[in-house]
């Protein structure tokens, strides 16, 4: 009975709801915040509230309620949301199919990308891409690679640019492999690292293990750092200010005002940080995805990240 009722509601909704309404409900379901959704859709809060009431009146059922934690959808509302998502996907597939038949690169492109890649590399890629394909609507989500990998697995977006190693059985492109370096200010350049603080930043477990191995081989202790930061950019600035030494990937070191030396294990193995583009295989059927992959690969081939000699040097 509830399923039948939801199906009836959706059939009725199809008559008067448009794609903006579908997306409005989806955004409200995900954010649970009327103010934020109103801003996203360039509506005033009263206008959004009025639209929601009209949808509920047309359907003859309440879909959501307000609470202290924000907007909460009831069981009927959740059923309508699933249909809204289906309609948005169907409309997008229709547009993509029409564009493909005409040879037009259009539609939408949703990307998840690591904060650091978005800061240092992606703007140049997107400039080239948007100049060539101005009809593509682009949505970019940034975050830590571990979070983005989970969201990619949950199909929140078809493409993710991640730093580090992740198990993935679909499309994978190695974008870059950059050195991990010892970093300190010039005033500390001649000091023994064991004599002054190590500045730590959060990274994935594999990277932590390799850094710990390097530190142990060189008689250093980096596990009890007195300063731990969330991102490499803040870590870089602390080192530049002479507050200690750190280890950073070269993506953020192009203009660092201090000492920068790549790290090697005792057996000569360089420590490197890889950046991958992972994507769902079926998304490659979309022209806008194909063209984005071509654009970013071409950019990475033509623009190398700061490189160093592969011969170990004292730090």
Image: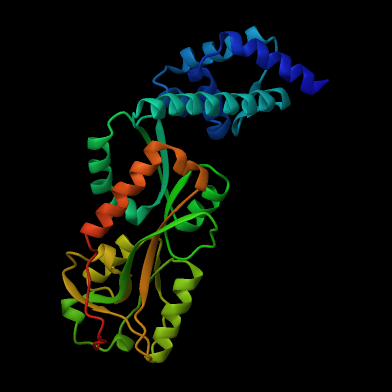
13 to 133, vertically: above or below: above
Q: In which quarter of the image is residue 190?
A: bottom left
Name the residue located 44 percent from the left edge and 81 percent from the top edge: 212
| Residue 11 visible in the displayed image | yes
Name the residue located 41 percent from the left edge and 76 percent from the top edge: 225
35 displayed left or right of 265:
right
174 displayed left or right of 153:
left
Q: Position of residue 228 (x, y in %)?
A: 41, 68
Q: Where is residue 58 in the image (x, y as percent from the top left)?
A: 63, 7
107 displayed left or right of 168:
left
Name the residue located 42 percent from the left edge and 22 percent from the top edge: 41
224 to 176, vertically: above or below: below
Name the residue located 37 percent from the left edge and 37 percent from the top edge: 288
Q: Where is residue 99 in the image (x, y as percent from the top left)?
A: 39, 26
Tally of numbered discs: 0
118 to 93, vertically: above or below: below
On-image quarter of the C terminus: bottom left
230 to 84, vertically: above or below: below
Q: How is the image coloured?
A: rainbow
Comparing 244 with 133, the one in front is 133
């Amino acid at each position: 009975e509830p399923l039948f009722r939801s199906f009836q509601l959706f059939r009725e909704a199809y008559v008067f709801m448009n794609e903006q309404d579908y997306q409005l409900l989806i955004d409200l379901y995900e954010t649970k915040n009327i103010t934020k959704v109103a801003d996203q859709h360039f509506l005033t809060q009263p206008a959004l509230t009025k639209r929601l009431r009209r949808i509920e009146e047309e359907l003859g059922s309440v879909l959501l309620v307000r609470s202290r934690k924000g907007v909460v959808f009831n069981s009927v509302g959740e059923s309508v949301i699933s249909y809204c998502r289906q309609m948005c996907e169907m409309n997008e597939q229709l547009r993509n199919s029409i564009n493909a038949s005409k040879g037009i690169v259009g539609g939408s492109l949703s990307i998840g990308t690591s904060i650091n890649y978005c800061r240092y590399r992606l703007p140049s890629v997107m400039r080239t891409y948007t100049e060539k394909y101005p009809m593509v609507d682009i949505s970019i989500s940034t975050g830590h690679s571990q979070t983005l990998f989970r969201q990619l697995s949950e199909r929140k977006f078809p493409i993710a640019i991640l730093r580090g190693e992740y198990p993935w059985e679909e499309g994978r492109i190695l974008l870059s492999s950059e050195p991990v370096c010892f970093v300190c200010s010039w005033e500390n350049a001649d000091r023994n690292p064991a004599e002054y603080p190590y500045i730590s930043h959060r990274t994935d477990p594999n990277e932590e293990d390799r850094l710990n191995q390097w530190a142990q081989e060189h008689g250093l202790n980096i596990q009890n750092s007195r300063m731990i930061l969330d991102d490499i950019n803040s870590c870089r600035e602390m080192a530049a200010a002479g507050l200690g030494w750190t280890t950073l990937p070269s993506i953020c070191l192009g203009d660092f005002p201090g000492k920068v030396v790549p790290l090697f294990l005792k057996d000569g193995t360089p420590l490197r940080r890889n950046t991958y583009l992972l994507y769902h295989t079926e998304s490659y059927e979309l022209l806008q995805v194909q063209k984005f992959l071509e654009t970013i690969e071409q950019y990475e081939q033509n623009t190398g990240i700061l490189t160093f000699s592969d011969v170990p040097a004292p730090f």
